[in-house]
Image (spheres, rainbow, N blue to C red):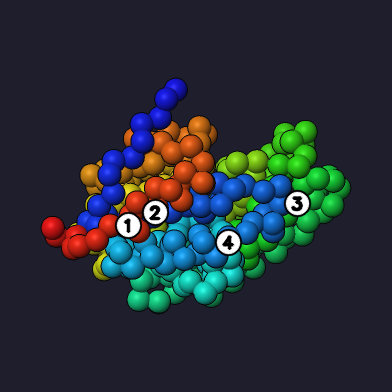
Amino acid sequence: MTQIPPPSPSLAWCVFLDVDGTLVELTDSPLETFADQELKALLGTVAERLGGALALVSGRSIQYLDALFKPLSLPAAGLHGVERRKASGVMQGTSFVDTQLDRARTAVNAFVEAHPGTSVEDKGRTIAVHFRMAPQHESSVRESLVAITNPLRVNYHIQEGNMVLEIKPRGFSKGAAIKTFMQEPPFSGRRPVFVGDDLTDQGGFRVVEEQGGISVAVGDRVRGQFGIDDPAAVRSWLRGIAALHGSRHE
């Protein structure tokens, strides 16, 4: 199905960006992700053009995002909204430690050790198992994580992503994080735009659409109001925002 390209950019927008598969190409291992200087400079310019109304909304931790995009320190929602950094720099949800996950962590590590090609990404508040390099283990990953998460099901659930399953706290989502950002400056009063490529981004799409905003799907894994082919095309689209001049009220 042919995707409709996004409308012409506006300085009246606020922009929310997923990272993996949206700003940077997906890699076999989550530790291989790389952001070049050109992308960092572009994000910095777009943020400046929008008066700071640009935020990263990712399944990664904010600590990881800061390392990936250093020296940038953008507003961000990490771990699917479990933690958040406001535009003011105030951090929320990053210092909480939940010992409930300790037993699950031990079980997940044992599972990954017994299934070559799978890998664990322990983010503290969430635990992800990747099987991109071992797709034959998908059913085993799913069955094991359901069993491991079951004792925690009141407070935790399994978040499905692209070749990854993740144990995460209930009550958090990318959509909820975007909704909270929209209540704060410099995002409030602007038209929201969310760009993402994965199942975890669909809630964010719904939130921006409900607020009269724009949802942009990258690739063909999910559907938004508009579509962009790949991260390279996302960069080209961002350059259009970076090239804007004038005032958001013009």
Q: Residue at x 58, y 65 (%)?
A: 68
Which circle, 1 or 3, is nearer the viewer? 1
The C terminus appears in which quarter of the rendering?
A: bottom left
Residue 205 x, y percent position in the rendering:
37, 43
Tell me which corner region of the image, top left, top right, bottom left or bottom right, holds residue 55. bottom left
Query: In the rendered structure, which disc, 1 or 4, sits on the residue that comes first in sequence?
Result: 4
Distance Cα–Cα, label 1 vs label 3: 41 Å
Res. 236 in view: yes
How much space separates mark 1 and mark 4, taking CA atoms?
A: 20 Å
Label whose residue precedes the other's in the sequence (4 or 2): 4
Label 4 crowd (10 A; few <14 / some 14-19 / many >=20): few
Q: What is the x, y in percent for residue 127? A: 65, 56
Q: CA distance from mark 1 to mark 2?
A: 6 Å
- Decide which of tag 1 and tag 3 comes sooner along the chain: 3
For residue 36, the mark is 4
Is residue 21 left or right of 122 when viewed as pictured?
left
Callout 3 crowding tier (Cα within 10 Å): few <14, some 14–19, many ≥20? many
Q: Nearer the viewer, residue 77 or 37?
A: 37
User: Mark 1 near mark 3, Cβ–Cβ under 8 Å?
Assistant: no
Camera-nearest residue between 28 and 123? 28
Q: CB atoms at circles 1 and 2 under 8 Å apart?
A: yes
| Disc 1: which residue | 243
The disc placed on residue 170 is none
Tell me the number on the disc at residue 119: 3
Left or right: 150 as drawn, with respect to 250: right
Disc 1 marks which amino acid? Answer: Ala
